[in-house]
């Protein structure tokens, strides 16, 4: 948990200011398709404001001309006529206010809808190196909070801004029209009131950023705790986590109390100043009214206008904060949109509908970060239809090899070739369609078992059934009440590790890949399921180039080729029988695992 140091806040606000101009330009581009709706909404606002300003003037005329002045009434210029006019003006204000909210709301929601789809489609195609250095929380915020802030800007902020500025100008104009001296008197208090409101709102805004910071931390803490709940409960770390949460929540609570205090003082303070302004007006006007130089209706209209002054000032201060937030959100979203040029391009590259499955690494050097080499001059060839097993200590670079074959990263030196073509030149859609990967940590989506096998691809029912059979998942899938349509909860939480593995085998087989990759699970699985999995591996491997990252050496006794890795290099390569004879690294590991089985 962190508090926010002042220097950090200053740095952040400097950065924010710098990016505001850019964000503003981008916002304009974003709103271009909706400019007609926005203009229409602004037009409605002008009418609503007009109605608002005319109402006190009508009342002033009723009071001064007809109630006090006893002027002759005729047609519309009578108490009855003006009453009708008042109702008509108020109704027009209401109707146009409704239209404005509708038009602006629709434009804002359409914008957010398009933006969210765009953000999701970008996130889906972000290259892995980008995802490696970006937290999922940040990306979720882009798609949800940030798009919502921008939408609010259109549905509420921009329109309110136009409305408030016009209203303030309109009130001043109407006051000057009625009585310039009374306007000056009113303005002895209004600037003080405006200053007070802006001062308090500024404090509220600063505190709001702190609140956002802590609520972000609380959300993150919740998300992390939920996904790690199994560990928390099994290690009885509930108390420790609760204490951490209590501390975090306490910090947040403090900021909310400040907010409550500031909000509580705002209304009474501004009320007090409004009353003071009215008192000064009355004090100034009394003598003039009895002297006949000022009409009572004018005083009445002024007191109404002074009360109307407060709302737009307070609103403007609020909207300033919203604009700042929306600009930050825009900048963040466009940071993502700028990545569009670097997104994965599924349709670009050499079309290779069906791969044969020959894989070659030619003097490959690869690092995730600068010159921290993870693979060092790795070379090997795996022939079409062969089964190759990668073994070696943890962190040796086995999974990295798989990622390179999938084209997730680009190598710095050397080449990764499939069927003699550099993987980076093959059309990505074709490359990925031809490779199916079963990872250690099987990922299942919420939906049905069938959805998890097809992943939305158009796979014939027959092929799904065959895949079920070949993956040995048939028995447990068909025995569940819904069969293939049995629901799967988030991440497959209600299935056993073995069942999840079998479904992922079915998924891989149903996609009929040319290359099958298995990052073997290290988790302990009962002997029965282990046998099923072994059979599923054999079925999946038949007729395909198969790569297995093996943790159990028993799995790979039948492999055509074993590649033993040590610190990013191929330490040893060859068929198992040959390596066994050679008595090197593989033989050592095999001996170790046998003695481990004997002693356990
Ligand atoms: N996305 C990444 N960003 C930075 N470094 C990474 C990344 N993935 C892996 N590494 C590093 O690369 C090295 C090789 O990792 P890799 O996952 O390929 O090893 P492995 O042999 O598959 O290990 P294990 O058997 O434990 O799965 C490790 O030092 C690891 O810390």
Image (cartoon, helix red, strand yellow):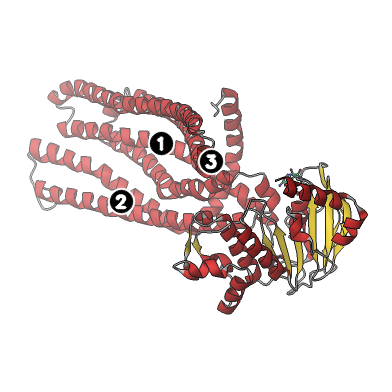
Element type at marker 1? helix
* Residue assigned mark 2: 97
Disc tally is 3
Element type at marker 3? helix
In which image quadrant can residue 501 be found? bottom right
In which image quadrant can residue 122 be found? bottom right
Q: Which mark is residue 266?
A: none
* Residue assigned mark 1: 318
Q: CA distance from mark 1 to mark 3?
A: 33 Å
Label 2 close to label 1 by CB (< 8 Å): no
Element type at marker 2? helix
Q: Position of residue 132 (x, y in %)?
A: 67, 47
Mark 2 vs mark 1: which is more N-terminal?
2
Q: Nearer the viewer, residue 58 or 160?
A: 160
Q: Nearer the viewer, residue 161 or 508?
A: 508
Q: Position of residue 451 (x, y in %)?
A: 53, 67
**Camera-side mark, 2 or 1:** 1
Label 1 close to label 3 by CB (< 8 Å): no
Q: Nearer the viewer, residue 309 or 493?
A: 493
**Camera-side mark, 1 or 3:** 3
Is residue 459 in view?
Answer: no
Q: CA distance from mark 3 to mark 2?
A: 45 Å
* Residue assigned mark 3: 224
The extreme front residue here reads 598
Mark 3 vs mark 2: which is more N-terminal?
2
How crowded pointer 2 is (Cα within 10 Å; few <14, some 14-19, many 20+) is rated as some
Q: Is residue 483 left or right of residue 373?
A: left
Q: Residue at x 30, y 48 (%)?
A: 48
Q: Is residue 317 above or below residue 505?
A: above
Label 3 residue near ligand 1, CB within 8 Å = no
Mark 1 vs mark 3: which is more N-terminal?
3
Q: Is residue 27 above or below residue 314?
A: below
């Amino acid at each position: 948990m962190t508090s926010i140091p002042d220097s950090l806040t200053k740095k952040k606000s400097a950065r924010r200011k710098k990016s505001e101009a850019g964000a503003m330009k981008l916002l304009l581009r974003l709103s271009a398709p909706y400019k007609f709706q926005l203009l229409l909404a602004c037009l409605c606002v002008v009418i609503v404001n007009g109605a608002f300003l005319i109402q006190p003037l009508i009342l002033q005329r009723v009071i001064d001309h007809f109630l006090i002045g006893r002027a002759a009434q005729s047609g519309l210029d009578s108490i009855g006529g003006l009453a009708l006019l008042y109702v008509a003006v108020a109704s027009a204000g209401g109707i146009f206010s409704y239209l404005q909210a509708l038009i602006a709301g629709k434009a804002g929601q359409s914008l957010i809808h398009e933006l969210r789809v765009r953000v999701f489609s970008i996130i889906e195609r972000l290259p892995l190196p980008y995802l490696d250095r970006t937290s999922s929380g940040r990306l979720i915020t882009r798609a949800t909070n940030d798009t919502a802030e921008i939408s609010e800007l259109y549905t509420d902020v921009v329109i309110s801004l136009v409305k408030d500025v016009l209203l303030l100008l309109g009130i001043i104009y109407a006051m000057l029209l009625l009585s310039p001296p009374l306007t000056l008197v009113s303005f002895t208090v209004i600037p003080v009131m405006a200053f007070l409101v802006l001062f308090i709102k500024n404090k509220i805004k600063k505190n709001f950023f702190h609140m956002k910071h802590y609520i972000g931390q609380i959300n993150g803490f919740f998300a992390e705790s939920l996904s790690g709940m199994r560990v928390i409960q099994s290690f009885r770390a509930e108390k420790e986590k609760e204490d951490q949460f209590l501390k975090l929540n306490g910090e947040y609570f403090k900021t909310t109390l400040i907010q409550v205090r500031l909000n509580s003082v705002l209304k009474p303070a501004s009320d007090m100043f409004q009353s003071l302004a009215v008192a000064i007006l009355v004090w100034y006007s009394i003598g003039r009214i009895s002297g006949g130089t000022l009409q009572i209706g004018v005083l009445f209209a002024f007191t109404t206008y002074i009360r109307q002054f407060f709302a737009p000032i307070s609103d403007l201060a609020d909207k300033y904060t919203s604009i700042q937030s929306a600009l930050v959100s825009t900048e963040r979203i466009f940071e993502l949109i700028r990545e569009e040029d670097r997104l994965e391009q599924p349709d670009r590259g050499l079309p290779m509908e069906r791969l044969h499955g020959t894989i070659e690494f030619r003097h490959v050097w690869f690092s995730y970060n600068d010159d921290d080499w993870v693979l060092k001059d790795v070379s090997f060839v795996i022939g079409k239809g062969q089964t190759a097993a990668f073994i070696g200590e943890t962190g040796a670079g086995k999974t990295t090899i798989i990622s390179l074959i999938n084209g997730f990263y680009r190598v710095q030196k050397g080449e990764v070739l499939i069927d003699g073509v550099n993987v980076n030149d093959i059309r990505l859609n074709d490359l990925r369609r031809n490779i199916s990967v079963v990872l250690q940590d099987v990922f299942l989506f919420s939906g049905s078992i069938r959805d998890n096998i097809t992943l939305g691809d158009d796979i014939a029912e027959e092929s799904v059934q065959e895949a079920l059979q070949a993956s040995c998942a048939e028995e447990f899938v068909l025995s569940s009440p819904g069969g293939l349509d049995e629901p799967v909860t988030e991440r497959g939480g209600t299935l056993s590790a073995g069942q999840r593995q079998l479904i992922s085998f079915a998924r891989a087989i149903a996609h009929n890949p040319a290359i099958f990759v298995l990052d073997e699970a290290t988790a302990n699985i009962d002997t029965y399921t282990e046998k099923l999995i072994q059979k599923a591996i054999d079925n999946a491997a038949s007729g395909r180039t198969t790569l297995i990252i093996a943790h159990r050496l028993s799995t790979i006794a039948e492999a055509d080729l074993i590649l033993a890795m040590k610190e990013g290099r191929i330490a040893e390569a060859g068929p198992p029988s040959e390596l066994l004879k050679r008595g090197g690294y593989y033989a050592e590991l095999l001996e170790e695992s046998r003695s481990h089985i004997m002693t356990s």
